[in-house]
Amino acid sequence: MPTVYLETFGCQMNELDSQLVSSRLRTLGYTFTPQADSADVVLYNTCSVREHAEQKVWSRLGELALRKARQPGLVVGVLGCMAEREGEGLIRRMPVVDVMAGPAELDRLPELLDNALKTRRALLAESATQHLLMTPEGIRPDLTLLRSAGQVALHGDTGRRSSTLAAAADQLELLDLSRSTSPDEHSGSAYVRITRGCNKFCTYCVVPFTRGAEVHRPPEHIIDECKRLADAGVIEITLLGQTVNHYRFEHDAATIVDGVVQPQKGRAYVHRRGVHEDPYKREKGERVTTFADLLYRIHEEVPSVRRLRFVTSYPRSFGDDVLQVIRDCPRICRYLHVPAQSGSDRMLRAMNRGYSVGEYLEFIDRARQHLHQPEIGRPLTIAGDIIVGFPGETEEDFLATADLLRRVRYKNCFIFKYSPRPGTVAHERLTDDVPDPVKRRRNYELLTLQAQISDEVSREYIGSELDVFVQSLSKRQSRRQRQTGALAATEHRSLIRLTVSAAGTHARPGDQSPHDDQGCCATHEKIEHTGPSEPEDHTLPVQMSARSDGDLIVFIDAPPGTPPDALIGSIVRVRVESASGLALHARPV
Ligand code: SAM
Ligand code: SF4
């Protein structure tokens, strides 16, 4: 069977999609490699949120075109948002691409790949040139021919799924339902999707176009998935959705197709003439599972999950009911990722965010009142996202955003330069009038400010005891072991499982940089191969990377005699000894 290299750009949602796709392909006999060079199939799961992430993929595809001249049997696939956004245009521009599948078509990938591999072999046996067309722009593949041969699988339904009927035909649900829970697929931690798509239409954002309308998965499916993962040894689950707190499943409106309860259309966000309506709360007498209900049920029904977290929260319609559930349930993490995007009301209106700075701050205060309890070792940490240089952003707007950062005191904040995305309202109707040097400066200034705040926040933990979830060898340790050729089997497994591009990686504590090459929400780091080999120093302790309940990164040394593999995926009590930059250094107690 062919060997596959799969690289993921962008957000946690993409990481989960990649995991689902790779576990499906694995069950069909495909094997995975962390080395693109030795693969028969190269797949890129792409992100379109910012232009930079797309540029990376274009340049990777350019490199593959050269390689395909030497290795004509190579099959190249583009998955995710770029496939959806670019459509056939992507293959016209990059004839090297054989397969495309948008986020709504991923369940079809095995079939598409199989066709592409067969056709590729057949083309090689005949003559590939028969399938090429001469055009004024040069030689292009004959799309009609290739499509009829099943070699080229174009993106899915770009129309937004707007009817219950369309949602009823939701094949993606089957992909989530059939996920593998094999211990090879996780290291004690897993993502579970609760909603797909988005209905918010922030004016800068492509997500509602690339991922379609918001649909909410049936609660039973979500809980079953959590149980299966827990049975397979997962102790940390992160629930995923673009606006998780808007989760809502109306049981009386559920549709069943072939015995399977179908995901349900999300409600539209209502914001009329300055009056915000909350369409997500439970009306009296309704049989509804709200986000608060869902969290509570997972906490109660899957007790072996010792950490339950969720991203991303939307600052509006975040009810006290959710805060109370978090407060009452000890295994739900006191961590909120709740993007503000700007500290200026004018900008928030232009972005169509549907809340004011005052309302955002009211939410932050309310969340802290309910959840910030450092005295019992349960502080609340808050992370955010900010966009600088949105059209029309003045120095005054920018300074208001800096004030917001000081006021909220995020643990960390992802700060992006505005990137105009074709098809969005901001791109079509607003002029991208903040010059790039100004965007860069604002980006840099906010990153610097946030680094100071994060540093202060980290230092508050010195001397305290925390339970941390051990995730992997630290980046430094991996590099050290790679240099000595002693990379642990576990690390190899996780590399094979998923390669997340550095370009699509969130700036993690300690590596916030003024460059706008961060993805939207990814958490993994690419492990780099640097420098010549050197003998391994067995006297040095093995450094592990862990995370606190509040998502703080914590470095610990494995106790002497404890194999690192035995620690990965477990929760360890530690005492924080120092904090440098955004990372904590701790010792097991
Ligand atoms: N749904 C989440 C929310 O609204 O809070 C965020 C999801 S979005 C994919 C991740 C982040 O990317 C956003 O919070 C925003 O800061 C950033 N982003 C989205 N579109 C962008 C654009 N066109 N330019 C720069 N940053 C953008
Ligand atoms: Fe994009 Fe806004 Fe939806 Fe988040 S809420 S995914 S920023 S449209």
Image (spheres, rainbow, N blue to C red):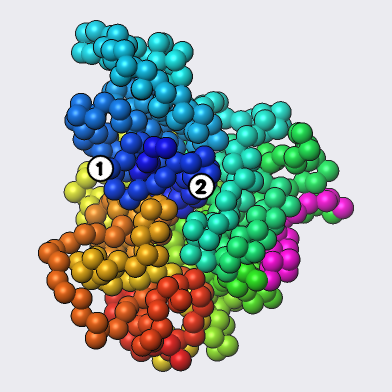
The magenta region covers: 285-303
Q: Check disc 1: other Cα within 10 Å, few if <14, some if 14-19, many if 20+.
A: few
Q: Nearer the viewer, residue 144 or 396?
A: 144
> Which of the labelled discs sits on residue 23, or is there none?
2
Query: Vertical placement of 397 versus 455: above or below?
Result: above
| Residue shown at the point (20%, 69%) measured from the top left | 484
| Residue shown at the point (75%, 41%) measured from the top left | 261
> Which of the labelled discs sits on residue 37, or is there none?
1
Whether the magenta-drawn stretch holds residue 484 is answered as no
Rounded to the nearest whole Å, what is the CA distance between mark 1 and mark 2? 21 Å
Secondary structure under the numbered disc 2 in the rendered image: helix
User: Disc 1 residue type?
Assistant: Asp
- Residue 328 appears in the figure: yes
For the N terminus, the quadrant is top left
Whether the magenta-drawn stretch holds residue 295 is answered as yes
Residue 169's x, y, as percent? 67, 30
Of labels 1 and 2, earlier in sequence is 2
